[in-house]
Image (spheres, rainbow, N blue to C red):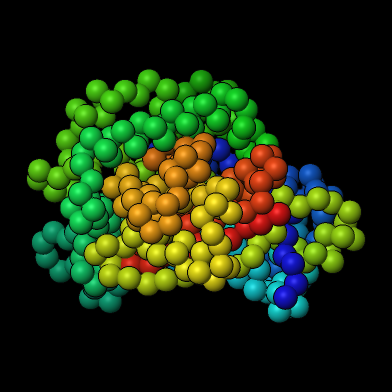
């Protein structure tokens, strides 16, 4: 099979829910990032654009196409949007990989975009045709309905983390320590300038100061966090539970795009890629334990590519919840002897934020850069997916 490369990638700083991107058109921001990425790499044409997005209500037709046109890509270049919940960004990259592997494309731009701060509320369905004849009615949050609840079982995602905490005997203290460590690693990476090469600074108008505010780093990282603060938070999803706002990932806005190309195309360009993609694997599991899908997908990658634990230099796995992440780490250590020290070395979603569909693209970009900057050879990226799924990718140099 053809070798398929990640040429480069660029992302927005991940912003807080109701933060810097509140009221901002995410298409404009995303187009700026896409344009900057293409210009940086002297590329003016791709064969296709594939973008993951979860909360799409109110964004308009096919946001991938909107962004591509706004970024001044030729109108003849097709684009489509993907929804695999939190796996959407990584799935978009898998579809790009498949298109190149099959010879349908030579170069594809893929990634994820999420605009939670501007997500709408939903009216009852009956209002469209039956109207409201009498009494009150309930509106629903599109974020909660379309991303945070397993629809068949009506189980909120936080309860699936509580299920894993019970199954794998993960204490509140362990979860708080994990969350604290994620922030400390992210602070260290940010302060060292590690993220600078992957972040596109956003210039946003501040309505309060009436000035342009340039955002250069992820907003969610908490510099003043302490274990004492984390331990003071109350459980959110269950009485006597262990999952809190502090040891869970947050709601966020963002965008991230990567350029994938065939080895022949890379050779013609005369560039050194960040990394090569070996392939992807997706899994399904009981939705009530959805967070463990990140481990099962990694396990499938290890089997598919006959990897030994000592060969794996880095693992980037999405931190949906500390309990979920710790269940993954525990299983990786028990089954493969993999040390936690190679996992999320620059922090993860608990510190950086989790703009649903962006996360898969973000962790793959982070992993590719880790491998290249540290002169390593192999890494795995993985995410759990609401509804009981998991997805992972294998990178090498």
Foreground: 313 or 198?
A: 313
Residue 97 lies, in percent from the top left, at 65, 68
Tell me residue 72's x, y (percent): 75, 55
| Above or below 287: residue 169 | above
Q: Residue at x 62, y 54 (%)?
A: 378
Comparing 182 with 87, the one in front is: 182
Let me know if residue 354 appears in the view. Answer: no
Q: Position of residue 122 (x, y in %)?
A: 31, 60
User: Going 51% across and 50% down the picture, which residue do you hit?
Assistant: 315
Residue 235 at least partly seen: yes
Q: Is residue 283 left or right of residue 123?
A: right
The residue positioned 56% from the left and 24% from the top of the image is: 191
Residue 184 position by quadrant: top left
Measuring 28% from the left and 70% from the top, which residue is drawn there? Answer: 286
Judge whether 173 appears above or below 117 on screen: above
Say which of 5 and 333 sits in front.
333
Q: Position of residue 63 (x, y in %)?
A: 56, 61
70 left or right of 213 in image: right
Left or right, residue 15 beside residue 196:
left
**What is the quadrant of the C terminus in the image?**
bottom right
Position of the N terminus by quadrant: bottom right
* Left-right relation of 161 to 63: left
Count of numbered tags: 0
């Amino acid at each position: 099979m053809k070798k398929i490369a990640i040429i480069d990638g660029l992302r927005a700083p991940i912003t807080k829910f109701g933060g810097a991107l509140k009221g901002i058109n995410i298409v404009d921001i995303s187009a700026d990032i896409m344009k900057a990425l293409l210009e940086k790499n002297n590329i003016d044409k791709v064969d296709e654009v594939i973008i993951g997005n979860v909360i799409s209500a109110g964004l308009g037709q096919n946001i991938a196409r909107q962004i591509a046109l706004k970024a001044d890509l030729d109108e003849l270049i097709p684009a489509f949007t993907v929804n695999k919940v939190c796996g959407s960004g990584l799935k978009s990259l898998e579809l790009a990989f498949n298109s190149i592997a099959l010879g349908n494309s030579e170069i594809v731009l893929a990634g994820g975009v999420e605009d939670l701060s501007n997500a709408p509320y939903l009216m009852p369905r009956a209002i469209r045709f039956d109207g409201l004849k009498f009494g009150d009615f309930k509106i629903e949050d599109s974020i909660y309905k379309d991303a945070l609840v397993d629809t068949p079982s009506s189980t909120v995602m936080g309860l699936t983390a509580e299920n894993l905490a019970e199954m794998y005997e993960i204490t509140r203290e362990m979860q708080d320590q994990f969350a604290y460590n994620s922030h400390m690693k992210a602070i260290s990476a940010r302060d060292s300038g590690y993220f600078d090469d992957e972040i596109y600074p956003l210039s946003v108008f501040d309505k309060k100061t009436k000035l342009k505010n340039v955002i250069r780093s992820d907003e969610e990282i908490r510099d003043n966090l302490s274990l004492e603060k984390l331990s003071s938070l109350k459980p959110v999803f269950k009485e006597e539970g262990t999952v809190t706002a502090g040891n869970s990932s947050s709601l966020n806005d963002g965008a991230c795009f990567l350029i994938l190309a065939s080895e022949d195309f890379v050779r013609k360009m005369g560039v050194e890629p960040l990394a090569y993609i070996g392939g992807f694997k997706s899994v399904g599991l009981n939705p009530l334990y959805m967070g463990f899908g990140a481990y099962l997908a990694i396990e499938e990658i290890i089997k598919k590519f006959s990897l030994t634990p000592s060969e794996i230099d880095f693992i980037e796995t999405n931190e949906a919840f500390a309990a979920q992440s710790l269940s993954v780490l525990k299983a990786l250590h028990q089954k493969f002897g993999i040390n936690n020290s190679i996992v999320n070395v620059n922090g993860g979603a608990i510190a950086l934020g989790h703009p649903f569909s962006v996360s898969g693209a973000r962790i793959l970009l982070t992993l590719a850069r880790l491998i290249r900057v540290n002169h390593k050879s192999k890494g795995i990226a993985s995410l759990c997916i609401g509804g009981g799924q998991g997805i992972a990718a294998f990178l090498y140099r």
